[in-house]
Image (tube, helix red, strand yellow):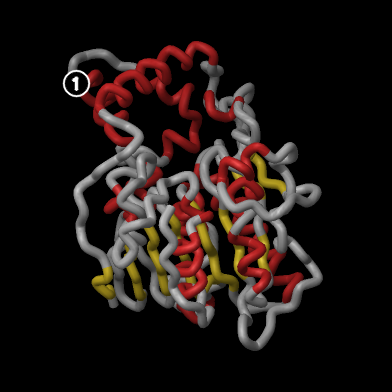
């Protein structure tokens, strides 16, 4: 059932206004001349390499010299689930961010609460191979490939986790694109069996500022559509600049349409959907919400509901203490839900 724990807030992006949107769009299109014009190559998945320290915010994690590092506490393949936490947790990073950059704060927290924690690198596609302009940045080639390719890579990783740990099911936590990668795995790559939920490989899904119904990119997609209506077709340039991972998450994209056709959820899965009114990437923030279908349970939560002082936006969301505590609660941990001004 849907527990109505959210209310609709007006969009109040602190970072992007209409002038900035137009400027950003112009830069994006101009930058497309630097991107490959051929079709993007197939992305690949990989395991993180090395270790990194615990981080308290995304910017610090992004500055760390090795974006390929394992998030602290993650990918201990000798870990065996406990009776208290029988399902390993697989953390799924978002677009143009590595597993370390996304989860260097939350992974050690999960491990500290006794969970077996795993985090793959998915959708690796360089700018040279078509991953888009952001793939040129430090660690930006992760999550750059087609979302469906990343979902298939996640399927292989989850099977490895199940074999290594002896568990029957895992729980998934996905940030941004990671949420739709997780849902794509459930629907298209064997993560769930709609005809027999007892065969589901996943029990709980937590999405954090996920692009579940696509994103308008705070007006950028609408601007592209307006130009299209005026007879100015820049879709190929924008696609080259954003790469397949970005393009697949646009509102109305072929992947988002296919993902949500027939309903948002699958039987036997519990979903916790976390979002923020200050999201300037997955917009509008209400598009993250899921509607439960038969046999599924959905908890849609805006983190400002009960904690107005938390101004966390999209990129830093996994480092919000409130979001972390809500995610832990969604995974069945007996923890207090905290409110920390940010």
Residue 206 locus on image (x, y percent) = 46, 65
Work out whether residue 69 can be spotted. yes
Left or right: residue 285 compared with residue 171? left
Residue drawn at x 77%, y 65% as measured from the top left: 76
Q: Position of residue 205 (x, y in %)?
A: 47, 67
User: Label 1 crowding class (10 Å Cα cut-off): few <14, some 14-19, many 20+?
Assistant: few
Q: Is residue 252 visible?
A: no
Q: Is residue 324 left or right of residue 195?
A: right
| Circle 1 residue | 229
Q: Residue 125: give x, y in percent of width and height.
A: 62, 33
Figure check: 121 above or below 105:
above
User: What is the count of numbered marks?
Assistant: 1
Residue in the picture at 52% in, 46% down: 94
**Quarter of the rendering containing residue 225:** top left
Q: Secondary structure at mark 1?
A: helix
- Residue at (51%, 55%) from the top-left corner? 318
Q: Nearer the viewer, residue 76 or 254?
A: 76
């Amino acid at each position: 059932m849907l527990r109505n724990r959210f209310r609709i807030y007006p969009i109040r992006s602190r970072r992007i206004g209409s002038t900035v949107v137009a400027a950003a769009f112009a830069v994006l299109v101009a930058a497309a001349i630097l991107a490959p014009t051929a079709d993007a190559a197939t992305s690949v998945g990989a395991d993180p390499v090395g270790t990194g320290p615990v981080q308290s915010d995304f910017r610090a994690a992004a500055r760390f010299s090795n974006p390929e590092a394992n998030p602290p506490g993650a990918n201990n393949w000798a870990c065996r689930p406990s009776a208290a936490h029988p399902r390993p947790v697989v953390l799924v990073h978002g677009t143009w961010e590595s597993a370390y950059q996304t989860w260097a704060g939350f992974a050690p927290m999960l491990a500290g609460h006794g969970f077996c924690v795993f985090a793959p690198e998915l959708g690796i596609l360089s700018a040279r191979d078509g991953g888009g302009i952001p793939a040129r940045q430090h660690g930006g080639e992760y999550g750059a490939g087609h979302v469906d390719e990343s979902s298939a890579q996640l399927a292989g990783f989850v099977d490895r986790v199940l074999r290594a740990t002896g568990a029957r099911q895992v729980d998934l936590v996905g940030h941004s694109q990671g949420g739709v990668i997780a849902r794509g795995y459930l629907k298209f790559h064997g993560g769930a069996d709609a005809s027999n939920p007892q065969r589901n490989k996943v029990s709980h899904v937590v999405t954090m500022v996920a692009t579940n119904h696509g994103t308008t990119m705070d007006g950028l997609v609408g601007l592209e559509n307006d130009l299209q209506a005026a007879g100015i077709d820049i879709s190929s340039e924008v696609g080259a600049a954003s790469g397949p991972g970005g393009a697949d998450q646009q509102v109305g994209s072929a992947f988002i349409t296919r993902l949500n056709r027939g309903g948002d959820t699958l039987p036997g899965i519990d979903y916790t959907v976390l979002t923020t009114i200050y999201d300037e990437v997955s917009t509008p923030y209400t598009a993250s919400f899921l509607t439960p279908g038969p046999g599924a349970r959905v908890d849609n939560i805006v983190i400002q509901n009960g904690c107005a002082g938390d101004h966390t936006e999209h990129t830093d969301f996994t480092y919000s203490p409130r979001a972390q505590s809500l995610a832990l609660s969604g995974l069945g941990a007996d923890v207090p839900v905290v409110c920390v001004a940010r």
